[in-house]
Amino acid sequence: MIRGGDIGKGTVLLIKNAPYLVVEREFVNPGKGSAFARVKMKNLKDGAVLTQTIKTADMVEDAEVNTLDCQYQYDDGENYVFMDSETFESVTVPESLNENLKFYLKEGEVYPIVIWENEPIDVKVPQKMVFTVAESENYIKGDTVSGATKPIVTDTGLTVRVPLFIKQDEKILVNTETNEYVERVNA
């Protein structure tokens, strides 16, 4: 159990028998009445977002979650297969957990896997990742408008809109939360 006033960003709470990760927390101390925390949470099992107001003196059940650092090995068609970096045991994460995860997993890279009740419920990918441009169409100079972009496909199959000057085989930095181009990376 955790006090409402002790809840912070990154805390995992157990609500309706499901783990929720606190993504935003706002502390409010009104002139009248007791202080409270307004928290925005994301369900780690299905991705649903919930906003709740919790008085600072109230007790809330926190979820016991563990994080394992695992190296991504391969996709077997139904599961993403990882290897625990400490025990070298295989950890399988069902593809149904997050269909879009395949665009962010790179063989040999280490990712934190969130475990709840001995089951993987989330794979954390970095907020920004470097990708190689696998497919890109060339443009003709003069056919541009200020700020024009084009779609490209990365080495993992992710489609991103980038500026026209980006060419095939270049490396780019992408924000994984929004799938937006950040900058070109000079290797």
Image (spheres, helix red, strand yellow):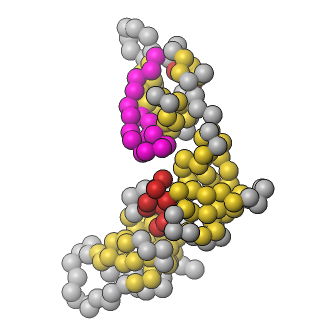
Dividing the picture into quadrants, the one containing residue 76 is bottom right
For the residue pair 63 and 9, the one nearer the viewer reads as: 63
In the rendered image, the quadrant that contains the C terminus is bottom right
Q: Main secondary structure of the magenta part?
A: strand
Residue 158: x and y in percent read 42, 71
**Left or right: 162 with respect to 125?**
left
Q: Residue furthest bottom?
A: 140
**Left or right: 119 with respect to 151?**
right
In the rendered image, the quadrant that contains the N terminus is top right
Q: Is residue 185 magenta?
A: no
Dividing the picture into quadrants, the one containing residue 46 is top left
Residue 84: x and y in percent read 71, 57
Residue 36: x and y in percent read 44, 19
For the residue pair 110 and 44, the one nearer the viewer reads as: 44
Residue in the image at 43% along x and 74% along y: 157
Residue in the image at 61% along x and 63% along y: 81
Residue in the image at 60% along x and 70% along y: 74
Residue 150: x and y in percent read 30, 77
Q: Is residue 138 above or below residue 9?
A: below
For the residue pair 26 and 75, the one nearer the viewer reads as: 75
Q: Is residue 121 above or below residue 51?
A: below
Q: Is residue 102 above or below residue 5?
A: below
Q: Residue furthest right?
A: 87
For the residue pair 63 and 93, the one nearer the viewer reads as: 93
Q: Which range of residues does the magenta coloring cover?
A: 40-55
Number of dots carrying numbers: 0
- Asked if one can make out residue 37 in the rendered structure from this viewpoint, the answer is yes
Residue in the image at 48% along x and 78% along y: 155
Q: Is residue 46 magenta?
A: yes
Q: Is residue 46 above or below residue 160?
A: above
- Asked if one can make out residue 24 in the rendered structure from this viewpoint, the answer is no
